[in-house]
Image (tube, rainbow, N blue to C red):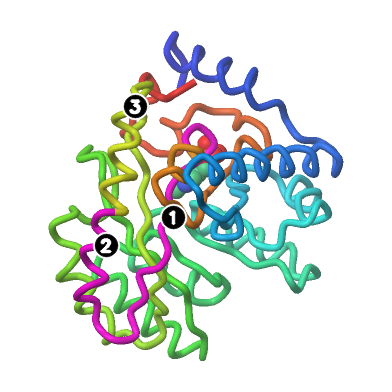
Amino acid sequence: MSGPVDTLTQHGQHGRYPAATTVEDFARNLTAVQLRIAAACRRVGRDPAEVRLLPVSKTKPEASLRLAYAAGCRTLGENKVQEAHHKWEAMQDLSDLHWSVIGHLQSNKAKLVARFATEFQALDSLRLAEALDRRLQIEGRSLDVFVQVNTSGETSKYGLAPADVAAFVQALPSYSALRVRGLMTLALFSIDEERVRQCFFLLRTLREQLRQSAPAGISLDELSMGMSGDYEIAIEEGATVVRVGQAIFGARPMPDSYYWPGEISLLRKE
Ligand SMILES: *Cc1c(COP(=O)(O)O)cnc(C)c1O
């Protein structure tokens, strides 16, 4: 992970998102993000109470997560299930801390998610729905889920093609331990704001279409979209959940291409 492109990306992120190392840093960053959320809502006449901020703690050490907790965070997002599971085990003393798994999951790891997560945002196959439901039934638990949609058309991104989501949603009532909440997407990584906005607009439009035909018990109220670089645009386009890591925790040590193999950091908005 070296070379001029990645080096540029790293420096850009570190300048923009200094590391949070105290409870005060976390409190300040959380307040700053909440203010920006409120401002974005005001621009489009939305109530800020409609938007949930999900702090994303991936790659950060347990000590940072504990500071975030002390600053008031009660749900943390992680994109790798094993890392999330380790953190959950290490932080059992914080009994009101909840975990949202936001990254791609292989069916053979459904068991781990079923054990500890309260939310899973990257549902993208019936095979996975089946595996999660089976393990959840065994654990006597249920799970809030979001269907991940690939709105950018990039082959490197996970998620269902928009045209496949309607049929997928029709099949979900068979899995009674999954509480379907809505849709999730990652926008194109681009400096072109209009193209980023287009991804969010597509997700909202899809949700409006699907709502007409959604089976009973399947709620599509939520739209999880927007991260540190683009959450204000996402809110303008209707996001009800924004997943924000670096703007709260500080830059990650490696560029995004490291965490999302196959994706390109060159076009990442700085
Ligand atoms: C890492 C990650 C985020 C947060 O990204 P930041 O740039 O840290 O805000 C959001 N969503 C998913 C799926 C992620 O993996």
Mark 2 or mark 1, earlier in chain? 2
Range shown magenta: 205-230
Residue 19 location, x and y as percent? 72, 30
- Please check the rendered image and state whether residue 228 is part of the magenta-colored stretch, yes or no: yes
Q: Amino acid at mark 1?
A: Ser
- Please check the rendered image and state whether residue 243 is part of the magenta-colored stretch, yes or no: no
Name the residue tied to disc 3: 264
Mark 2 or mark 3, earlier in chain? 2
| In this picture, residue 231 sits left or right of residue 203 | right
Name the residue furthest top: 4
- Asked if ligand 1 lies within 8 A of label 2, the reply is no
Position of residue 124 relative to residue 78, above or below, is: below
Dot 2: within a 10 Å radius of its alpha carbon, few (fewer than 14), some, or many (20 or more) residues?
Answer: few
Q: Amino acid at mark 3?
A: Ile
Name the residue tied to disc 1: 224
Residue 26 location, x and y as percent? 77, 42
Q: Residue at x 80, y 70 (%)?
A: 93
Which label number is shown at residue 208?
2
- Asked if ligand 1 lies within 8 A of label 3, the reply is no
Residue 209 location, x and y as percent? 21, 63
Q: What kind of element bears circle 2?
A: helix
